[in-house]
Structures are given as structure tokens and as C-alpha cells.
Image (cartoon, helix red, strand yellow):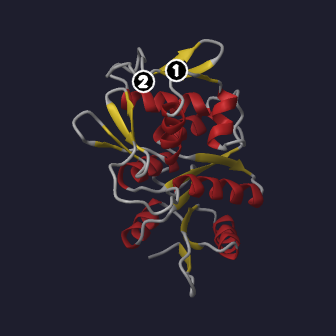
């Protein structure tokens, strides 16, 4: 296998990250830096190398550059989201707003623009990984999983999974689950974008950008019988969004 770099941990279990970037200097810098922060890190220069690494192990998070030779990062993000339960952070060039929007629509959990500060990148990685981890709860007798009805679907809070009316699982990103949990536990209550940012602990987002709107639009395609006329998660003009639990049931 060519253009692949790896750093393996010799002690303890560490979360695995995958850096996909065709710039050798940037890729090796990130592999070394993130390894020094306690992660087990692999590096790949292109989609072919990324797929080869995925055959052996699914990482907890993929740091994915958009501008790659051959198959670009957006196509690879779609491939990852369809096949693997992993966090995705897109890396874009400054000003590539459209690419960031498309990346979020595909299902990326976050994005960072080049040039970036490694400390900011590390904070974003930790945030995505933290959201993806199931909450640790005290041991209790076996019981039915706590559920919230979301339109025709059911959200299982303990397993962080969403099922449609026929019992088929609907794939969710960690941020999509967080949004559904926030709405589901606050029915008939208008939530502003700023409140949603606070509740999801994504304070790095700008409440006036399109990140929240894009994710809610993606959720509507998954839970609304008619996403063009949303009834479950409604837009309250000039105020925010509101979950209506009795809609589309």
C-alpha cells in the first residue's frame, strides 16, 4: 500500500483517528500531533488508501480533506456515512462555503477551514467524539429502553438509535441524535438557534450561519412524511424551531 502512514499505540486502548489528506507535510504533521495527544492515528493520501485502511479497522473519527486527487472528499464523506458509524470532520479551504454546506448535508459532523490552529482542531475532534459516546448511566435492572416518539418514528435514548414505523433503523449522525433528543425532551417549546447551540454544546458554530438549518433539513427528510411541509419539527418564523409530538403520528 502506498502513501499510507500509521502510528500504533503500544499501551492501552486509544480511540483511532484517520487523517485523509494528500499533502504529505500536513498529513504527517497531523498524525504526529494527534498521536502525541493520546490517539491512535492512521494517515491516508487518497480514497484508495482510505478504503484499504477501513478494511482493517473502522476509526472513531475521520478527518477528511475535501480537495483530494481522484475521488474528492465530499464523495468519500458520502461513502463513509453510508457504510460506517464514524465521526467525520471535513477540512475545507478558506471561503469554500458551498463545500462546507454540501459536507454537512451529506452527514459530516463538523468542518474546519485551512489554515487551522491545531488546538482548535483538537477541540473539535474531542467534541465530535464526546457526542458520539453513549452516556454512562448507573447500573439498573433491565428495562425497556427509554423512547420518545418523533412523528412516525421512535427515538431510543439509551442506544442513540432511531426506528421508523416499521421498526427499521434510520441512520443518524451523532449531531442528528443530539438535535432529536433536545427537541424530543422539550415538546411544544420554541428553541432559538442560540439555545440549540448551547444545548448541543456546539458553541463554535455561529448561530447565524446555516449549520443548524442544514441539519434540521436533513432530519426532516428522515422523520417527516412530507419534508416540504414539516409538521414534526416546525419553523417558527423569526424565533427558531419547535417539536410538535402529536404531529404525523
Vertical position of residue 167 compared to residue 25: above or below: above
Q: Which mark is first along the chain, 2 or 1? A: 1
Q: Residue 23: x, y in percent?
A: 63, 63
Q: Residue 121: x, y in percent?
A: 70, 56
Disc number placed over residue 188 in the picture, else none = 1
**193 and 65: which one is in front?**
193
Q: Quadrant of residue 226?
A: top left
Q: Quadrant of residue 7?
A: bottom right
**Quarter of the C terminus within the rendering:** top left
Q: Residue at 57% across / 35% down in the picture? A: 101
Disc number placed over residue 245 in the picture, else none = 2
Relative placement, left or right, of 96 versus 73 is right
Q: Is residue 73 visible?
A: yes
Q: Are marks 1 and 2 in contact (CB under 8 Å)?
A: yes
SS at badge 1? loop
**76 and 121: which one is in front?**
121
Crowding at dot 1, Cα within 10 Å, few <14 / some 14-19 / many 20+, comes out as some
Q: Residue 25: x, y in percent?
A: 69, 68
**35 and 113: which one is in front?**
35
**141 and 188: which one is in front?**
141
Q: Residue 173: x, y in percent?
A: 47, 46
Q: Residue furthest front?
A: 141
Could you tell me how far apart the alpha carbons at marks 1 and 2 are, in whole angstroms?
A: 7 Å
Q: Residue at 56% across / 83% down in the picture? A: 12
Amino acid at each position: 500500500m502506498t502513501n499510507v502512514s500509521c502510528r500504533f499505540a503500544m499501551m492501552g486502548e486509544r480511540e483511532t483517528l484517520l487523517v485523509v489528506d494528500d499533502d504529505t507535510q500536513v498529513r504527517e504533521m497531523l498524525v504526529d500531533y494527534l498521536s502525541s495527544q493520546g490517539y491512535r492515528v492512521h494517515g491516508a493520501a487518497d480514497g484508495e488508501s482510505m478504503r484499504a485502511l477501513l478494511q482493517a479497522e473502522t476509526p472513531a473519527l475521520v478527518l477528511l480533506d475535501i480537495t483530494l486527487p481522484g475521488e474528492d472528499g465530499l464523495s468519500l464523506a458520502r461513502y463513509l456515512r453510508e457504510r460506517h458509524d464514524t465521526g467525520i470532520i471535513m477540512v475545507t479551504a478558506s471561503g469554500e462555503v458551498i463545500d462546507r454546506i454540501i459536507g454537512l448535508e451529506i452527514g459530516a459532523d463538523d468542518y474546519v477551514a485551512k489554515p487551522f490552529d491545531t488546538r482548535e482542531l483538537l477541540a473539535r475532534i474531542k467534541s465530535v467524539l464526546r457526542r458520539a459516546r453513549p452516556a454512562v448511566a448507573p447500573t439498573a435492572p433491565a428495562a425497556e429502553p427509554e423512547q420518545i416518539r418523533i412523528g412516525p418514528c421512535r427515538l431510543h435514548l439509551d442506544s442513540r438509535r432511531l426506528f421508523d414505523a416499521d421498526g427499521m433503523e434510520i441512520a443518524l449522525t451523532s449531531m442528528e441524535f443530539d438535535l432529536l433528543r433536545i427537541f424530543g425532551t422539550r415538546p411544544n417549546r420554541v428553541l432559538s438557534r442560540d439555545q440549540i447551540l448551547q444545548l448541543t454544546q456546539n458553541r463554535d458554530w455561529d448561530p447565524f450561519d446555516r449549520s443548524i438549518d442544514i441539519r434540521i433539513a436533513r432530519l426532516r427528510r428522515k422523520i417527516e412524511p412530507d419534508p416540504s411541509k414539516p409538521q414534526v419539527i416546525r419553523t417558527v418564523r423569526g424565533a427558531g424551531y419547535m417539536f410538535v409530538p402529536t404531529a404525523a403520528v
